[in-house]
């Protein structure tokens, strides 16, 4: 006896309203309530029958998604003419509308501009089927190659690092889930499991020879001189699924590398290392949380360090700072949780440094630049609360450097960079936050030295935003044109929206709409479900084009039977 | 014994066939209610005696053949069955009672007999091509039996619909109160009883009562009947019962239960005491209770065997002897691979090889006592090329890796890219040089996975220019211009669901939704024959391991055995109650296994056309089958994600491998049978230790007779490895001759 009751199965019947709607759609006005009820039961039964047969085709098609062709084949089994034309691969959503006491489900049909179709380039031809071989297992061991799934899924890496006691080997995990499914044996299994001591399986932290070789190759390529090799190595780090065992090594490599190279002011190497961090972060199969304590200090170093290169006046260390700041922002976004509070801790760090340099005139412009960059990458809110209030002071300082006596070239360059950075980030924020009009004097009063420049930037930003908005509007305008609507019932078993389809397409004499589907009970007028496109005259090329467009039009105007497609997977409950 | 003329009956039956073929499932077939020519006397005597029914069946077949002027077959059949010439005349005359009389109870049996007719495989002599027209089975294998009304009318006997739940509840209370050892056995009665009571209510238009009855008790049924219950629940009106396959299955075939004598007595006494005729009638009419002497079975034993559409197989259905041994390999003068030997010698292990070869030779000389006679069915003669291939095979076999729990095979996975959910079938050649794929867009594609490209034979005009005496004539006939890595075969008009290479790699078979099986030449890459016979989708087809013969099975529930040079089937195997979903030849080619959506596996004797095994235990449609290389064991996989292992000789389940979470589409034993690989929709390949699984099995005649099987609960210990693919369902597996495992599937991004 099944312990848990299964969901009720026997009472799913189409509502009688649908029957009425369908009847109306083919011109039968007054349908008795009893007839509706009888019809709906009959129709529901037949639909279930067809769906059951369609499932057979799905199973034999070795899919877990029911497609329209399965329905067609099931209809064919029953000696019913299939519904031609419903070949769409995508799920077609029905819209719902109510009003005037009526409820409608309709399929939104877009009007299509023929010239658009003609002018758009043809879609790419789909790729042909091809065969590719890879090793799923070599003598019982699954190699970690991109073709295979990651050996330890991210979830498992996470549980291993966060809850070491609960972590189990994949094999055991499966066993557990299977036995859960078997009601009778689960109790037994549990007992057995509890009896075992809960110990974290001792994991070996040694790398295999191949992995050691790989590690060596990758690290050498990443910091080596050949750019092509480096790109390949970074690509490998970003995509390979089997790297989790090497992750601690990579992490140490990066943090140590940054520590050494900052001292030696080796800009190139620092950039390479940051790119490695980026690649690691891009790899979807890695669970980086465990190694943030090594990576974040390295990244922050690259943002705020006083000196990153040998010749600060010439080398573009600003780009590294920007890049690292973006990395920082990205990791804040992905890894920050309420427990580790990465974002707020990072923000605090930056502000602390920033505060210090605000007080202390002697702080390097480079560090200042790094702080501002790091903060502003964190988002407009951070800019608004932490940077905007300081604009005046910062402006004064920049003014002092640029107007004052030339102390050093380096300072001048630094001030310039800080200025442009501030303008870039603040302008958009101000544009959003500050009401019109943009008065230069007002800006000067509010933001000091940087005011006038900010003002012009803001004006520019506003113009840009307006332009974008306009573009968006234009596209939405074309979408929001009044659309013809269609009730769902028209494409049902009883009838079809043939007359409407016909009215859309006005390609005289080149099309014949024919009715098929004999024997459906409620069908009175001949609706069209089968489209036959025939050319009457061979004609000029323009006729051909029209024909071609007509075919396309059909493709666009196709509707969907409401039972036609279940986008969910195979659990089709009927 | 009223009299009815032969002629009248003849006409009616023909009408039957017509309606069968043109019927779209909704036609009214009242006129045919009297069609089957069966005895009215058999109507009431529904005793579970098999012999009487057999006799009837034979007679029905004889009649049919006679009417269709198939005198030759009549003679042969009569000779085979040992019937006297006039034996078949008598039942014809007394069928009138069923025909004209409106007594529903009586005519009900007519339906039964007719359905029996459909169940009997039509065995015709082998050497001359079958003369029995495929029509027969096409008719009876169709969606509805000709006598729906007759079938249904059995339900017209009715009690008070309000009392049904009470009856059921009463029985439930009784069964819950009996001793534990009997409870599990008696609980088997619940499901068939529930179904028949529900159908009775529906048939008698007690719609609401039926609904209530269903809601009240459907939750009690075993969870593996859920699919059937769903179908049942959708059937809420009398009109729905017409043409519903599941309903007809329930009615036309008795639900088989195996119950120990003690438990049965208990039930009988209870029902008689209570005067509970309603239930007793159902049990008498619709259930076949297979009573055995001995211990009642436990719940787990019953659960292991039940789950099929029509209960367990009858015990005597599995009694026939099956020659599961392998045929003797023809002795071929093997030019004992000299070069190889020398090469091996250099490596310094010559001794190891010698005895191996000897053992192989001696093995093939001894005749296996369980093997069928070499000439039991005629097999094609070996051609020179076949011999060469055999030699190659043996050479490769010497390099075979011995697999085991400590020595797992490497798996090479062939992914079909850009298949867009369209890949429906895959096959490898035995020597693993070619891969074929069947697609939903009706195409068949063949790839070469060796550097040797696929080439077509030259056109006839070019061929005439070739010097036929030259040594490399086989090379010269190939058209170098057509060399490519893959070829596409166009011809089907529906998705291709089954595909199979011939053992000699010259032909390819494909079966499709369009109802045909096509034979393709891999020399010219054209279609040679379209075998028509199945009118409905053909789900699977498979070449015999010796070539020439092939089997196909599909939606029409009939498996057909064909020979490549006959356009009509040689044998038709009818008996499954739902679609045949997969087919497979036994390694000795004398038997054919079919798996079905009725959740049973049947083994058919190719020579006699009889069903020799009915294996129940799966809880979902079966989608894959595999024989162990020694022919002794079989594995089957179903939508329920379980692999079951069977002993073919005893007809018993010997193991259950749990682990997959979705339909198993591929099963394969390694070349030595130590390892079973299974591939599933859940994107995994799993390897199982079959040596251990079969070692644990201990069988005696008692367990074989009663089904007291003890399945070892060790499927986790048997699991040797699980290999996830990225997002690729595994739909085919193949062991190369050196025991490398090849897997194939379409990547589903």
Image (cartoon, coloured by chain):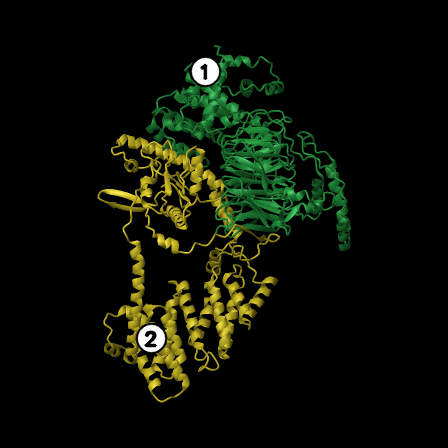
Q: Position of residue A253 (x, y in %)?
A: 52, 70
Is residue B276 visible in the rendered image? The answer is: no
Parent chain of label 1: B
Please say if the residues under marks 2 and 1 sit with CB atoms less than 8 Å apart. Answer: no
Q: Nearer the viewer, residue A559 or A143?
A: A559
Q: Nearer the viewer, residue B32 or A518?
A: A518
Q: Position of residue B701 (x, y in %)?
A: 61, 29
| Residue that badge 2 annotates | A423
Tell me where residue A559 sits by quadrant: top left
Parent chain of label 2: A
Q: Position of residue A226 (x, y in %)?
A: 55, 71
Q: Which mark is residue B44?
A: none
**Which residue occupies the extreme top position in the image?**
B2
Is residue A185 visible in the rendered image? The answer is: yes
From the viewer's perspective, tell me whether residue A396 is left or right of residue B220: left
Q: Residues within 10 Å of mark 1 (few under 14, many from 20)?
A: many
Q: Secondary structure at mark 1?
A: helix
As drawn, the chain in green is: B
Badge 2 and badge 1 in a common chain: no
Q: Position of residue B251 (x, y in %)?
A: 45, 25
Q: Nearer the viewer, residue B49 or A33?
A: A33
Q: CA distance from mark 2 to mark 1?
A: 100 Å
As drawn, the chain in yellow is: A
| Residue that badge 1 annotates | B98
Residue name at image x 48 percent, y 55 percent: A166
């Amino acid at each position: 006896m099944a312990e848990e009751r299964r969901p009720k199965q026997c009472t799913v019947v189409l509502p009688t309203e649908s029957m009425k709607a369908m009847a109306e759609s083919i011109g039968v006005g007054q349908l008795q309530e009893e007839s509706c009820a009888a019809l709906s039961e009959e129709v529901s039964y037949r639909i279930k029958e067809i769906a059951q047969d369609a499932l057979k085709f799905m199973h034999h098609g070795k899919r877990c998604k029911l497609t329209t062709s399965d329905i067609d084949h099931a209809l064919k089994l029953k000696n019913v003419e299939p519904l031609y034309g419903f070949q769409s691969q995508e799920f077609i959503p029905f819209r719902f509308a109510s009003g005037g006491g009526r409820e409608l489900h309709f399929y939104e049909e877009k009007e299509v501009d023929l010239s658009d179709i003609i002018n758009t380039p043809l879609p790419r031809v789909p790729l042909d089927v091809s065969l590719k071989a890879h090793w799923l297992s070599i003598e019982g061991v699954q190699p970690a190659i991109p073709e295979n799934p990651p050996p330890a899924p991210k979830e498992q890496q996470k549980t291993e690092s966060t809850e070491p006691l609960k972590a189990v080997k994949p094999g055991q995990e499966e066993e557990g889930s299977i036995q859960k499914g078997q009601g009778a044996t689960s109790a037994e299994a549990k007992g057995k499991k509890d009896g075992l001591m809960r110990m974290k399986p001792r994991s070996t932290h040694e790398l295999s020879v191949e992995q050691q070789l790989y590690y060596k190759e990758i690290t050498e390529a990443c910091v080596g001189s050949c750019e092509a090799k480096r790109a390949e190595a970074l690509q490998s780090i970003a995509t390979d699924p089997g790297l989790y065992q090497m992750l601690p090594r990579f992490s140490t490599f990066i943090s140590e590398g940054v520590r050494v190279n900052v001292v030696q002011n080796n800009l190139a190497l620092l950039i390479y290392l940051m790119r490695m961090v980026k690649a690691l972060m891009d790899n979807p199969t890695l669970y980086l949380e465990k190694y943030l304590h090594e990576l974040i200090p390295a990244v922050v170093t690259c943002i705020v360090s006083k000196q990153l290169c040998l010749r600060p006046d010439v080398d573009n260390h600003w780009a590294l700072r920007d890049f690292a700041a973006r990395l920082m922002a990205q990791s804040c976004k992905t890894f920050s949780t309420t427990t580790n509070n990465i974002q707020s801790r990072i923000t605090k760090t930056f502000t602390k440094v920033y505060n210090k340099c605000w007080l202390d005139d002697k702080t390097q412009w480079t560090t200042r630049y790094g702080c501002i960059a790091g903060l502003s990458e964190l988002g407009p809110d951070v800019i608004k609360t932490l940077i905007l209030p300081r604009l005046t002071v910062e402006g004064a300082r920049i003014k002092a450097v640029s107007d004052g006596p030339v102390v050093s070239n380096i300072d001048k360059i630094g001030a310039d960079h800080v200025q442009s950075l501030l303008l870039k980030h603040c302008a958009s924020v101000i544009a959003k936050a500050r009401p019109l009009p943009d008065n230069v004097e007002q800006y000067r009063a509010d933001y000091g030295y940087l005011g006038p420049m900010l003002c012009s930037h803001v004006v520019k930003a506003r113009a840009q935003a307006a332009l974008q908005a306009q573009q968006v509007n234009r596209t939405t305008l074309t979408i929001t044109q009044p659309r013809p609507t269609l009730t769902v019932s028209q494409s049902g078993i009883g009838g079809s929206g043939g007359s409407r389809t016909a009215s859309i397409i006005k390609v005289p004499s080149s099309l014949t709409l024919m009715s098929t589907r004999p024997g459906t009970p409620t069908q009175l007028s001949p609706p069209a479900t089968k489209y036959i496109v025939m050319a009457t005259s061979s004609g000029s090329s323009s006729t051909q084009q029209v024909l071609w467009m007509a075919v396309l039009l059909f493709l666009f105007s196709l509707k969907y039977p409401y039972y036609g497609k279940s986008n969910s997977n195979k659990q089709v409950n009927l | 014994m009223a009299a009815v003329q032969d002629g009248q009956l003849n006409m009616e039956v023909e009408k039957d066939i017509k309606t069968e073929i043109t019927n779209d499932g909704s036609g009214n077939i009242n006129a045919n209610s009297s069609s089957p020519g069966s005895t009215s006397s058999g109507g009431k005597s529904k005793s579970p005696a098999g012999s009487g029914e057999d006799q009837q069946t034979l007679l029905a077949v004889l009649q049919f053949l006679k009417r269709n002027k198939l005198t030759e077959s009549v003679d042969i059949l009569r000779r085979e069955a040992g019937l006297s010439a006039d034996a078949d005349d008598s039942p014809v005359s007394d069928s009138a009672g069923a025909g004209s009389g409106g007594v529903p109870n009586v005519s009900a049996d007519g339906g039964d007999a007719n359905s029996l007719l459909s169940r009997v495989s039509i065995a015709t002599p082998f050497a001359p091509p079958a003369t029995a027209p495929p029509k027969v089975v096409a008719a009876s294998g169709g969606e509805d039996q000709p006598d729906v009304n007759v079938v249904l009318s059995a339900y017209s006997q009715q009690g008070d619909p309000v009392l049904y739940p009470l009856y059921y509840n009463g029985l439930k209370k009784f069964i819950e109160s009996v001793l534990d050892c009997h409870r599990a056995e008696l609980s088997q009665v619940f499901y068939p009883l529930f179904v028949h009571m529900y159908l009775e209510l529906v048939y008698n238009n007690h719609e609401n009562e039926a609904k209530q009855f269903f809601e009240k008790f459907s939750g009690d049924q075993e969870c593996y009947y859920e699919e059937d219950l769903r179908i049942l629940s959708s059937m809420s009106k009398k009109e729905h019962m017409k043409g519903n396959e599941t309903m007809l299955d329930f009615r036309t075939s008795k639900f088989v239960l195996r119950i120990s004598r003690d438990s049965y007595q208990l039930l009988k006494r209870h029902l008689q005491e209570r005067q509970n005729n309603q239930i007793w009638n159902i049990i008498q009419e619709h259930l076949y209770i297979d009573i055995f002497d001995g211990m009642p079975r436990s719940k787990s034993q019953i659960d292991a065997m039940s789950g099929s559409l029509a209960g367990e197989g009858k015990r005597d259905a599995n009694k026939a002897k099956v020659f599961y041994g392998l045929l003797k390999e023809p002795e071929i003068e093997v030019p004992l691979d000299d070069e190889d030997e020398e090469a091996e010698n250099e490596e310094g292990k010559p001794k190891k090889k010698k005895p191996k070869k000897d053992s192989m030779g001696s093995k093939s000389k001894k005749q296996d006592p369980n093997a069928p006679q070499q000439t039991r069915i005629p097999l094609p003669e070996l051609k020179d090329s076949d011999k060469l291939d055999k030699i190659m095979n043996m050479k490769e076999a010497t390099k075979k890796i011995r697999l085991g729990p400590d020595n797992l095979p490497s798996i090479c996975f062939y992914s079909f890219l850009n298949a867009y959910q369209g890949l429906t079938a895959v096959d490898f050649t035995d020597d693993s040089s070619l891969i074929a794929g069947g697609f939903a867009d009706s195409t068949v594609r063949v790839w070469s996975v060796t550097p040797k490209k696929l080439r077509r034979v030259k056109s006839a005009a070019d061929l005439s220019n070739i010097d036929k005496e030259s040594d490399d004539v086989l090379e010269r006939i190939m058209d170098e211009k057509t060399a490519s890595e893959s070829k596409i075969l166009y011809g089907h008009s529906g998705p291709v669901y089954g595909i199979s290479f011939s053992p000699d790699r010259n032909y390819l078979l494909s079966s499709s939704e369009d109802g045909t099986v096509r034979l393709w030449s891999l020399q010219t890459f054209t279609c040679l024959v379209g075998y028509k016979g199945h009118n409905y989708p053909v789900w699977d087809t498979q070449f015999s391991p010796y070539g020439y013969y092939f089997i196909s099975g599909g939606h029409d529930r009939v498996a057909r055995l064909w020979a490549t040079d006959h356009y009509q089937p040689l044998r038709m195997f009818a008996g499954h109650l739902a679609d045949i979903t997969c087919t497979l030849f036994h390694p000795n080619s004398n038997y054919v296994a079919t798996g079905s959506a009725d959740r049973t596996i049947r083994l058919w004797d190719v020579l006699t056309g009889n069903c020799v095994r009915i294996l129940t235990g799966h809880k979902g449609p079966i989608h894959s089958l595999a024989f162990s290389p020694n022919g002794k064991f079989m594995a089957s996989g179903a939508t329920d994600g379980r692999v079951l292992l069977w002993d073919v000789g005893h007809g018993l389940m010997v193991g259950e491998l749990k682990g997959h979470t979705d339909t198993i589409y591929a099963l394969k034993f390694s070349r030595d049978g130590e390892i079973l690989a299974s591939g599933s929709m859940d994107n995994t390949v799993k390897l199982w230790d079959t040596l251990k699984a079969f070692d644990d099995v201990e069988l005696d005649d008692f367990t074989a007779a009663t089904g007291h099987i003890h399945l070892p609960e060790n499927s986790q210990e048997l699991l040797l490895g699980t290999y996830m693919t990225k997002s690729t369902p595994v739909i085919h597996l193949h062991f190369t001759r050196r025991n490398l495992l090849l897997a194939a599937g379409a990547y589903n991004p």
